């Protein structure tokens, strides 16, 4: 694997970051995960817009303005051939003597690497996945894609301890999102997901899926989902750049709906893949790479 660090393309073992890096000491940085299918980055501009918003929110000047990101990411993908992959990229405020306030002078650290995207196998369509619920113990700016993910890490580990793939987070009796995904619920054919705001990450997959479903007339609402309605939902889905649209069929050990992936999920995944194919290939068709 070839990674990118501060202008160089090199094996990750040879990439060195100072222990004084503020990403290491304070979690002072932001990141993105961008999927790539057939060698093409999917929704790159949307991801770069969100990166720009995260950088602005933490008052870190963009270290690669003027199209530098796209060029670097394309070059990195070319050096890591493979099928479906995701690019992880992070920007931190760089190395400086340890002090919480911003350093007078520091050069941002830019790191990127490529990982395979595990295809959603037939087992998922047949059985779905398990999730648990957990209290949302994160900070008040979950809309910033910060590398400081300790609360997410603890929630995901709690899920892993229960052999579940995700922790679905609850705050003040309402659904927020997953530890590393957005959450959708379906009740009587109506699709609902938490509205945008500081309590959730504005997921790129979330927005794309909402657009795809609304375009075909599905009733989709961005409104708060109380915990009782989450637990009574006919279907629950997780979305993210690496998960696509994943059906949750067990929540805290109880079946969701009839305990099998639901018909609206099937339609949603099909729509999502069709729209992705259309966007990436400029024509209608079916993206069969994950079936
Ligand atoms: N996580 N909410 C949280 C807390 C997330 O970490 C993610 C993605 C999402 C979904 O966003 P998107 O559709 O833009 O991927 C929602 C990435 C994949 C990660 O941390 O690996």
Image (cartoon, helix red, strand yellow):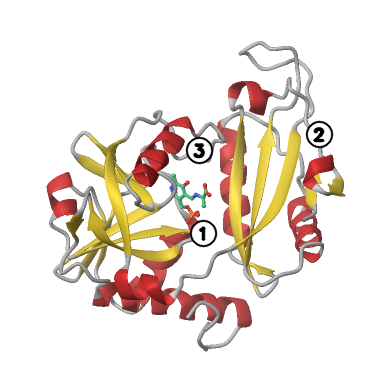
Tags 2 and 3 touching, CB below 8 Å: no
Q: Which one is in front, 8 or 53?
A: 8
Residue 47 horizontal/vertical position (percent):
59, 54
Q: In the figure, is residue 212 to the left or right of 67?
A: left
Task: From the image, state whether disc 2 or disc 1 is nearer to you.
Answer: 2
* Up/down of 42 relative to 16, above or below: below
Mark 2, Cα crowd under 10 Å, few <14 / some 14-19 / many 20+, is few
Task: From the image, state whether disc 1 or disc 3 is nearer to you.
Answer: 1
The residue that mark 2 highlights is 16
Secondary element at tag 3:
loop
* Up/down of 245 relative to 87, above or below: below
Q: Which one is in front, 6 or 52?
A: 6
Q: In the figure, is residue 9 to the left or right of 149?
A: right
Q: In the figure, is residue 233 to the left or right of 194?
A: left
The residue that mark 1 highlights is 241
Task: Compare marks 2 and 1 and give the one earlier in the sequence.
Answer: 2
Task: Compare marks 2 and 3 and give the one earlier in the sequence.
Answer: 2
Secondary element at tag 1:
loop
- The CA span between labels 2 and 3 is 26 Å
Label 1 lies in ligand 1 vicinity (Cβ under 8 Å): yes
Mark 1, Cα crowd under 10 Å, few <14 / some 14-19 / many 20+, is many
- The CA span between labels 1 and 3 is 16 Å
**Residue 128 placement: quadrant:** bottom left
Quarter holding the N terminus is bottom right
Mark carried by residue 144? 3
Residue at image x 28%, y 47%? 132
Secondary element at tag 2:
loop
Q: In the figure, is residue 56 to the left or right of 195?
A: right
Residue 21 horizontal/vertical position (percent):
72, 24
């Amino acid at each position: 694997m070839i990674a990118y660090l501060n202008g160089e393309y090199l094996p990750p073992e040879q990439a060195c970051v100072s222990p004084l890096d503020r990403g290491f000491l304070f979690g002072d940085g932001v990141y993105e995960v961008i999927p790539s299918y057939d060698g093409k980055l999917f929704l790159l501009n949307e991801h770069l817009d969100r990166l720009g918003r995260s950088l602005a929110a933490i008052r870190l000047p963009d270290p690669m303005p003027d199209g530098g990101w796209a060029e670097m990411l394309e070059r990195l993908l070319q050096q890591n051939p493979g099928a479906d992959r995701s690019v992880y990229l992070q920007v931190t405020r760089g190395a400086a003597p340890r002090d919480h306030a911003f350093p007078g002078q520091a050069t941002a650290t830019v790191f990127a690497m490529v990982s395979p995207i595990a295809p959603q196998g037939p087992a998922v369509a047949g059985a779905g996945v398990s999730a648990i619920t957990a209290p949302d113990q994160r900070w008040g700016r979950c809309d910033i894609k910060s590398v400081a993910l300790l609360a997410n890490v603890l929630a995901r580990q709690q899920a892993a301890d229960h052999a579940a793939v995700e922790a679905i987070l609850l705050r003040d009796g309402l659904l927020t999102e997953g530890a590393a995904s957005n959450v959708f619920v379906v009740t009587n054919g109506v699709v609902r997901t938490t509205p945008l705001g500081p309590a959730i990450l504005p997921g790129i997959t979330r927005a794309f899926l909402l657009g795809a479903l609304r375009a075909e007339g599905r009733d989709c609402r961005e409104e708060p989902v109380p915990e009782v309605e989450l637990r009574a939902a006919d279907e629950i889905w997780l979305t993210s750049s690496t998960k696509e649209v994943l059906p949750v069929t067990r929540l805290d050990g109880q079946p969701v709906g009839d305990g099998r992936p639901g018909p609206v999920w099937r339609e949603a995944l099909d729509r999502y893949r069709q729209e992705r194919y259309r966007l990436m290939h400029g024509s209608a068709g079916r993206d069969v790479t994950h079936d």
